[in-house]
Image: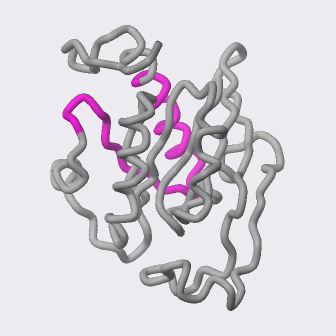
Amino acid sequence: MKIVVAGGFGAGKTTLVGVVSDIVPLTTEAVMTAVAEGVDDVRGVPDKLTTTVAMDFGRVTLAQDLVLYLFGTPGQSRFWFMWDDLCRGAIGAIVLVDTRRLADSFSAVDYFEDFGLPYIIAVNCFDGVFAYEIDDIREALSVAPHVPVVTLDARDRESVKAALIRLVQQSMAVRAGIAADHRPVGTGIA
């Protein structure tokens, strides 16, 4: 099954794919150059020296009969033209959120809502960053009550696996037309 990992620039998508992948992940990291100055907003991530320019790819086996193929999207808006291709055939998406740059998550949430792809919000818990309440993050992102909001550490394999399992559960529930609390939900999925 195909899973998309999206979110803002510097949210931890490449790290997430790499930490959980059973194979050496394919990454398209490039060193940021002077050309990106004024184009890529590095506020909140001043130590970031590289950026994904196409996608990240990894594979994780959750069970003998359940293999996930992970596709990490580039975070900058100049690369969004690739999202449609990356999302084609996916069962769901993780929107990885960095609360230091919450506004960077709005476009990913809107995209998956419009695309009709089941998704979860995964708040990446960065060291030294204030931990907001889940309900506050849900409200700030205007996420529907049936969309799970979870926390994770993109550097921790077990934490990421738990989020992937939650996404698979959400995808199955949305495809069945019910939310986790058994309320009917619209899917937008054919």
Q: Which one is in front, 148 or 91? A: 91
As for residue 112 lying within the magenta part, the answer is no
Q: In this rendering, would 120 be left or right of 92?
A: left
How has the structure been colored for display?
A: one colour
Span of residues in magenta: 144-170
In the image, residue 71 lies at what x, y percent? 66, 43
Residue drawn 57% across and 54% down? 80
Q: In this rendering, would 139 be left or right of 122?
A: left
Q: How many marks?
A: 0
In the image, residue 101 lies at what x, y percent? 36, 70
In the image, residue 75 lies at what x, y percent? 55, 61
> Which quadrant is the N terminus positioned in?
top right
Quarter of the image where one finds residue 74? bottom right
Q: Which one is in front, 145 or 109? A: 109
Quarter of the image where one finds residue 53? bottom right
Residue 127 vertical position relative to residue 159 in the rendered view, above or below: below
Residue drawn 28% across and 20% down? 180
Quarter of the image where one finds residue 130? bottom left
Residue 151 vertical position relative to residue 115 in the rendered view, above or below: below
Point out the residue furthest to the top here: 176
Residue drawn 53% across and 56% down? 154
As for residue 147 lying within the magenta part, the answer is yes
In the image, residue 7 lies at what x, y percent? 48, 55
Residue 57 vertical position relative to residue 97 in the rendered view, above or below: above
